[in-house]
């Protein structure tokens, strides 16, 4: 029979879970979206490698003060034993770790560094590709939108991956969408296809 009714974390389980007994010397922190609406901050013990005992905390939201208030429930002597925390480059995550684990070294996750560099190179490549296409097609109107500068665009256009090319007719209705790296020839083919729309 389930012991859910007597579970000590039941009253706050929708907002946070804390398993201080899983803490170790090497941790990771990241945010994840379990749905389009709800995001969570998850702190894990790297030694557990995603298996039993990996989750230390799972906290609804990513607001640093909210996360810190939960992590401070872990006894200070346990938090001071943490040597290293791997995190992405988000400022809120850095603040959370500095305040919650003051003796830990912060290590930026190489995936996020590589992703950032790759996105920057890709953005430059796309910009130059469009400049060449516009020279060849002076009637074409192209707009570059950085989702870093305009995050609302991700939601407005329901973007799931980057880069995404959205072709609109003269009235602003979407007529085609392509995601990922697209060769110049394919772009020119699509531009020609929709030229008079």
Image (cartoon, rainbow, N blue to C red):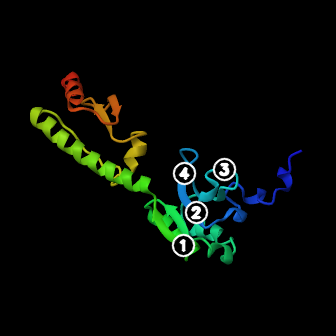
- Which residue is at the far right? 1
SS class, disc 4: strand
The x, y position of residue 126, in whole percent, is 24, 42
User: For residue 32, which numbered disc appears in the image?
Assistant: 4
Instruction: Decide which of 35, 100 is in the foreground and name it.
Output: 100
Residue matched to label 3: 51
Q: Earlier in the sequence, mark 1 or mark 3?
A: 3
Q: Earlier in the sequence, mark 3 or mark 4?
A: 4
Q: Earlier in the sequence, mark 3 or mark 2?
A: 2
Direction from residue 50 to residue 125 in the image, left or right:
left
Q: Earlier in the sequence, mark 2 or mark 4?
A: 2
Asked whether the residues under the numbered discs 4 and 1 touch, taking CB atoms below 8 Å apart as contact, a structural biologist would say no
* Residue drawn at 66 percent across, 77 percent down: 76
Distance from disc 1 to disc 3, alpha carbons, whole Å, reads 23 Å
* Residue drawn at 35 percent across, 53 percent down: 116
* Residue drawn at 54 percent across, 68 percent down: 84
Query: Relative to 92, does residue 110 appear above or below in the rendering?
Result: above
Residue matched to label 2: 27
């Amino acid at each position: 029979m389930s012991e859910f009714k007597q579970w000590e974390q039941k009253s706050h389980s929708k907002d946070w879970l804390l398993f201080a007994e899983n803490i170790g010397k090497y941790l990771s922190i990241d945010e994840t979206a379990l749905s389009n609406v709800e995001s969570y901050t998850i702190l894990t013990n790297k030694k557990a490698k995603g298996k039993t005992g990996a989750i230390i905390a799972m906290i609804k939201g990513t607001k640093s003060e909210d996360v810190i208030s939960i992590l401070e429930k872990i006894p200070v002597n346990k938090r001071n034993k943490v040597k290293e925390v791997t995190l992405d480059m988000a400022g809120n995550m850095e603040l959370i770790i500095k305040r919650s684990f003051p003796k830990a070294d912060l290590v930026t996750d190489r995936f996020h560094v590589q992703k950032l560099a790759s996105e920057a190179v890709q953005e430059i490549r796309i910009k130059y590709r469009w400049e060449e296409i516009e020279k060849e097609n002076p009637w074409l109107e192209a707009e570059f939108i950085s989702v870093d500068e305009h995050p609302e665009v991700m939601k407005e256009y329901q973007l799931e991956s980057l880069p995404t090319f959205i072709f609109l007719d003269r009235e602003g209705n979407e007529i085609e969408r392509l995601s990922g790296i697209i060769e110049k020839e394919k772009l020119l083919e699509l531009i020609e296809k929709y030229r008079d729309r």
